[in-house]
Image: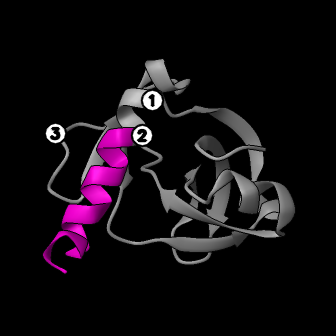
Amino acid sequence: MNAWDIYSYDFPDAGPHPAVIISSPERTVRKPWVSVLLGTSQRASRAPDATEVLLNGADGLDWETLIKCDLIHSVRKSDLRNRRGAVSSARRRQIVQRMIECNGWNRL
């Protein structure tokens, strides 16, 4: 399990969805809890909005998936199932930039 891997996770209020690990590599290796972003479980049928990034087959997914960058979830690594892929380096930058913008961290 590594930072930027995509797994399936059963989110308590949303059900099973793709989850992108965004914790540092050090935390991901050593700690039982990691931070993740939720992805859509249905095929994306629209362009991403200001809080989302679109992932696809280049990231190891079967179809286009919107990743929601405005809410970080803390989950137990042991609850992550079925590695689905890994976010490409170009999309990693997009996710980080989108997280900075949609959470207002660029206005600090």
Label 3, label 1: how many angstroms apart (C-alpha)?
20 Å
Tell me what residue is drawn at x 66 percent, y 57 percent: 9
Tell me what residue is drawn at x 27 percent, y 52 percent: 97
Q: Which residue is mark 3?
A: 47
Q: Relative to the observer, which residue lies in front, 66 or 25? A: 25
In the displayed structure image, the side of residue 25 where residue 79 appears, left or right: right
- Can you tell which of label 3 and label 1 is closer to the viewer? 1
Q: SS class of the residue under badge 3?
A: loop
Q: Relative to the observer, which residue lies in front, 44 or 28? A: 28
Disc sitting over residue 5 in the figure = none
Q: Earlier in the sequence, mark 3 or mark 2?
A: 3
Residue range in magenta is: 93-108
Q: Which residue is mark 1?
A: 89
Label 3, label 2: how many angstroms apart (C-alpha)?
18 Å
Crowd rating for badge 1 (residues with CA inside 10 Å; few <14, some 14–19, many 20+): few
Is the image coloured rainbow, by chain, by secondary structure, or in one colour?
A: one colour
CB atoms at circles 1 and 2 under 8 Å apart? Answer: yes
**Residue 3 x/y as whole percent:** 64, 47
Q: SS class of the residue under badge 2?
A: helix
Q: Which residue is mark 2?
A: 92
Q: Quadrant of the C terminus?
A: bottom left
**54 in the magenta segment:** no
**Residue 52 x/y as whole percent:** 27, 52
Label 1, label 2: how many angstroms apart (C-alpha)?
5 Å
**Residue 49 x/y as whole percent:** 15, 52
